[in-house]
Image: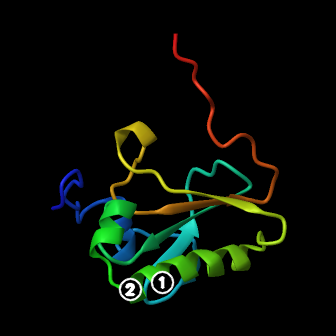
Amino acid sequence: MSAGIPAYDKNNIFARILRGEIPCKKVYEDEHALAFYDINPQAKIHVLVIPKGAYVSMADFAAKAGDQEIAGFVRAVGKTAEKLGVVESGYRLLANHGPNSHQEVPHLHVHIFGGQKLGRMIAVERQA
């Protein structure tokens, strides 16, 4: 475990999906990644793309994944956006890490939001 990066939980829901223990509505899959619809969508199109390796966050992935795996994951995000038909109209990518970001599953994942006009990226909270 690297400094600041928690240990990977091999029983998190995404690990279980990757092992086939929990079904998902698949959009795209290759040797490096799996993309599937979010079960609680926050936009007309809301898909998650996850690497097949055991990574908690982007920092963990950047530190431990090989070049082919990193390139494969980035390409999978792009291919998924193409399959969803959101490349021309536009889409948003979001990856959360840690408690302040509200990361719910401790497995690196990128959300693809699209299919509609999206609001502000972050609601600004004013400090007193």
Task: Return the residue at label 1.
Answer: 71
Tell me the quarter of the picture where residue 60 sits.
bottom left
Element marked by disc 1: helix
Q: Amino acid at mark 2?
A: Asp
Comparing 128 with 102, the one in front is 128
Residue displayed at 84% across by 65% down: 89
Element marked by disc 2: helix
Question: Residue 8 location, x and y as percent?
Answer: 23, 62
Q: With 46 as the anchor, is 16 left or right in this view?
A: left
The quadrant of the image that shows the N terminus is: bottom left
In the displayed orientation, state which residue is furthest to the top: 128
CB contact under 8 Å: marks 1 and 2: yes
Q: Amino acid at mark 1?
A: Ala
Comparing 7 with 62, the one in front is 62
Task: Return the residue at label 2.
Answer: 67
Q: Is residue 16 visible?
A: no
Q: Residues within 10 Å of mark 2 (few under 14, many from 20)?
A: few
